């Protein structure tokens, strides 16, 4: 369907007023920002006693016999230069305050699915609302993520590549 054209006459003052308004509107409009695609991801890793913290096994409360106050302790897993793991118990708050943080670049991500049975229950018949003599297992699926990282911070570990669990990053 062709567009119908009409001829309109306006004064020169009206034309200049319209063009000024158009110019001001163009100046007010913000340019469209296109965000850049993220191609590199970084994270932090902790170092304790010149060893990389591979993870925290458990955090627990312990009674200090001298002060009679609860103290939070943590069992941390340390990775030495040979790749061997050692377990060390530290004061949790001291660890969080004093552990050195280094930056790592995430190179690869590996996700593994772990399926376990976490108990069972009798099967429920939904029509009669009664339990049957059948046992049904509770199947739990857990996703375990490991990263291959490269240390980018200056220092002893610079350019070292490690394979670490997700829980050891950004703690």
Image: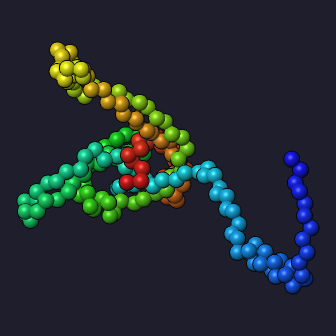
List the single residue furthest toward the top: 133
Residue 132 point in image, percent of width and height = 18, 16
Instruction: Identify the residue at horizontal 35%, vertical 55% (top origin).
Output: 48
Instruction: Identify the residue at horizontal 64%, vertical 57% (top origin).
Output: 35
Residue 138 point in image, percent of width and height = 27, 26
Residue 164's quadrant in the figure?
top left
Instruction: Identify the residue at horizontal 89%, vertical 57% (top origin).
Output: 4
Q: Is residue 50 visible?
A: no
Residue 32's quadrant in the figure?
bottom right
Residue 121 point in image, percent of width and height = 20, 24
Residue 39 point in image, percent of width and height = 62, 50
Answer left or right for 46 relative to 23.
left
Residue 49's quadrant in the figure?
bottom left
List the single residue furthest toward the bottom: 13
Position of the C terminus, as image quadrant, is: bottom left
Depth check, front residue: 97 or 144: 144
Q: Is residue 43 visible?
A: yes
Instruction: Identify the residue at horizontal 36%, vertical 34% (top origin).
Output: 142
Q: How is the image coloured?
A: rainbow
The mark tally for this picture is 0
Depth check, front residue: 144 or 63: 144
Depth check, front residue: 94 or 139: 139
Answer left or right for 45 relative to 57.
right
Answer left or right for 68 relative to 12.
left
């Amino acid at each position: 369907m062709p567009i119908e054209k009409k001829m309109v006459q306006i004064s020169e003052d009206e034309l200049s007023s319209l063009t000024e308004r158009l110019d001001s509107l163009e100046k007010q409009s913000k340019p469209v920002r296109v965000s850049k695609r993220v191609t590199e991801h970084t994270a932090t890793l902790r170092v304790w006693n010149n060893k990389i913290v591979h993870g925290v096994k458990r955090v627990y409360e312990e009674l200090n016999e001298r002060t009679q106050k609860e103290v939070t302790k943590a069992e941390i897993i340390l990775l030495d230069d040979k790749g061997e793991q050692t377990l060390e118990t530290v004061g949790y708050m001291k660890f969080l305050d004093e552990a050195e943080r280094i930056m790592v670049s995430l190179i690869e991500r590996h996700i593994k699915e772990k399926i376990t049975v976490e108990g069972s229950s009798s099967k429920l018949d939904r029509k009669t609302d009664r339990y049957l003599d059948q046992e049904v297992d509770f199947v739990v699926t857990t996703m375990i993520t490991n990263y291959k990282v490269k240390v980018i911070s200056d220092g002893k570990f610079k350019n070292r590549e490690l394979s670490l669990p997700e829980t050891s990053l950004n703690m």
